[in-house]
Image (cartoon, rainbow, N blue to C red):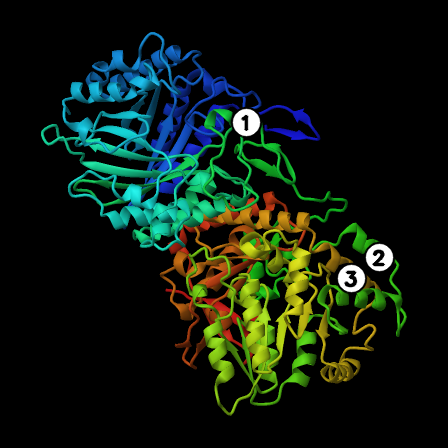
Amino acid sequence: MISSRLNGEKIVAAQPLGTLVSDQLLRLCRAVGLRRSDSEVYARVLTDCLGSGAERSLDQPPPHPSFLSDDHTPVEYSLALVPDAPPTLRVLLEPGYAAGTLAQQGRTGLRVVRAMAERWGFSTGRLDGLEDLFFPPDPQGPLALWIALELLPGGVPKVKIYLNPAASGAERAAETVREALDRLGHRQAFDALPPADGYPFLALDLGDWETPRVKVYVTHRDASAADVGSLPRTEPGPGRETVEEFFRVAAGLEGADPYSGTGRSVRLAGRPVLSCHSFTDTASGLPSGFTLHVPVRDYVRHDGEALARATAVLRRHGMDPAALDRSLATVSSRPLHDGVGLIAYLALVHERNRPPRVTAYISAEAYAVRPPLPARPRHQPFSSPRAARTEPRETLHSVGHGKAGAEIRMEPYRIKVVEPIPLTTPQQRKAAVERVHYNLFDLRADEVTIDLLSDSGTGALSSAQLAVGMAGDESYAGSRSFYRFRETVSELTGYTHILPAHQGRAAERILFSNLLEPGDTVLSNTHFDTTRANVELNGCVARDLPCPEARNLDSREPFKGNIDLRALEQALGESTDSRVAAVVMTITNNGGGGQPVSMENLRKASELCRRHSVPLILDAARFAENAWLVTRHEEAYRNHTPRQVAEEAFRLADGCVMSAKKDGIVHIGGFIGLNDPELAQKCELLLIATEGFPTYGGLAGRDLDMMAQGLQEVTEPAYLAERAESADHLAQRVRAAGVDILEPPGLHALYLNAGRLLPHIPPHQYPGHALACRLYLEGGIRSAELGSLYLGEEDEDGNPVKSPPYELVRLALPRRVYTRSHYDHVGRTLERIAKTAESVRGYRIVEQSPILRHFRAKLQPVTG
């Protein structure tokens, strides 16, 4: 059960804290590859350590405002990553969380540590020798004792404890640290520490450590890159440039010049940076290890930005961020842009005789999610941890918190009509896919449980759309439905001439038949398949110019749908026999993974086209989704509405073609928009001959009315926000299943990296198609291959002549059709497939058509 709030009323009841965090830990253990038996041991240890606090319901506020996390959850996870090795999972917990006073918490914590020592056979001698320093009769400060467990195979963790140097007063913290180091034999160590604004923790390794450490944590307020570069005291240690670069990337100062006064002197005015200094050598007095902790959560707008920074840090140090992606998805299902603090700290760790590592600290978020900031943080402080709210934080469409401790985001509509979905057996699915020769396009819809083949014409109509459809005017010529449609489209796009068509490919055929001449070239960020086909059917060349960022499937660059402006300028200026007849900008870039195009890129492309007198045409099928992503990621448009962005985008182009089956949210329909009267007249004549009279264009009046209504609804922020959240929810489920996707996820589809999941299948045996078939066989899920079957070519013997750069499978998300539980089914299915990925086999083509072969090809599994 969960606890939530709706219209101010509390709905009971919630699960216990222990259930939440133990479930999180089990999933994390699985994500890093620990055996189930070990994971279950560690989950029990966690709940045992929390004592009575583990049974406390999450609909009650925390019994103690734990300093361990911003929302007072007494548990935090961390993932330590190194190059070319599995990550190490740790859990930090406050064992005296529910014990009462700070003194009682300390006594409870000591009992838990000594019980661990008895269970796992290690000594607490070093802790016993410091008890009077850190556990006085009337302790002060924010904590009594924390325990960190490094979770290893075998069910026996490494144990570390955190002690509070301010237990006898903050003014005596430095003295307490010095005395503790002296008692532990490190008499010169305190003098080796850098200047400090405070000493928040002293930590001890207990148990089976190769070289047990004592670690001193130091606070550095208002730190700059130049400041942190001087903090390491280890020999050998990280170079100044390495430390400064990590600081700049983690803190969001990467754009600053590292060698300028500004770049090195920008200071973090919020939560302070921490350095940690490990001591193992009692003779030299020098630290053997150094760690820089950057509180990334105070210097990002939301966790999407935090993950982007973590990814950048990991890649710069030669580490794979996939494990972090999977781990975040196992802890919380909320969209990353819905809150800030899931990634609490990023740390760069250097220890003698060990490779450098990066550690990401992950919050449990049991009690609250900090809302995202409305604008980019300017290195200003948040309120202190003790001021953190303990009730769920309300944000757009929020109705409280659920079992993952995250905000529940609800669809901005209620369901009035339901359609049963087919629930088939594995035997039925096997027979069906064999009957259609393993081409999923040929399956009957009633043989598919979750249909993610396309988002084109597959959305659910709103009640308002159905209402206007009932009043549609079916007059052959001059219907009022057409005039309403034309007024709506003209107001949105600014184009003078609006011609309806029955769908986007019909609009493309009509436009290109009049715009192009044989031998012409059309340039694009990426042509969609039917766009390319209509260009080539006119005897022309379709040439793609995707931006360089699009080549990296894993990067989180926000505008990987952009056109390569340098290549565009070069192509427009070339003197060749082939005339550049048009530039088509696809927004979002469907053929490029559903990635958006920035307004800056579109504006510069428009300027180039006008300089060379080449028309710029928008493929506007997903214009609203592109506009939404612009408002989320392009600084100059953060205060714009999606509608405002869309209107500006249309006016940067000379015309558009649109399949309204996407962002018109209708089952049929499209249009051409133009300003050129001569070209519009030619298109109108072909429209009359092949589609219908210009005031209906092959559509019923009701279709025109419903399209007009859909074009108004599609730019509503509430609708777009929910669509983004659904896509993000599925993305997290897919990552948690161990399957990589094209990052970052867009709105209309997710693109699975089939080539990476199935490296044993060569391109000419179609790994993407193999994954799509297994998805159907395993879970009744229909998807679309976008790899060698879609884009590749083979010779008559089946040997590859042309292979695409990537092997992808598209999971297209119909609008307002499937709920999160449907997408959970997709995630569970992929998880089962990923566990036995080596059993998936490739396919070969036995019959194909010369164009758009993926629609009609017949295939067979490769045997042997």
Estimate the spatial distance between the alpha carbons at disc 3 and disc 1, rounded to whole Å: 44 Å
What amino acid is found at the position of numbered circle 3 in the picture?
Ala
Tell me the residue that label 1 is attached to: 389
Estimate the spatial distance between the alpha carbons at disc 2 and disc 3, rounded to whole Å: 9 Å
In what quadrant of the picture does the C terminus appear? bottom left
Q: Residues within 10 Å of mark 1 (few under 14, many from 20)?
A: some
The label nearer to you, 2 versus 1, is 1
Q: Is residue 52 left or right of residue 431?
A: left
**Is residue 396 positioned above or below 391 on the image?**
below
Q: Position of residue 555 (x, y in %)?
A: 42, 57
Tell me the residue that label 3 is attached to: 708
Q: Residues within 10 Å of mark 2 (few under 14, many from 20)?
A: many
- Please indicate, yes or no, whether residue 320 appears anywhere in the rendered image: no
Q: Position of residue 251 (x, y in %)?
A: 40, 45
Instruction: Please report contact status of discs 2 and 3: CB closer than 8 Å, yes or no.
Output: yes
Give the mark nearest the N terminus, 2 or 1. 1
**Which residue is located at x 28 percent, y 26 percent?**
160
Tell me the residue that label 2 is attached to: 468
Q: Position of residue 202 (x, y in %)?
A: 28, 25
Which residue sits furthest top? 137
> Picture quarter containing residue 86?
top left
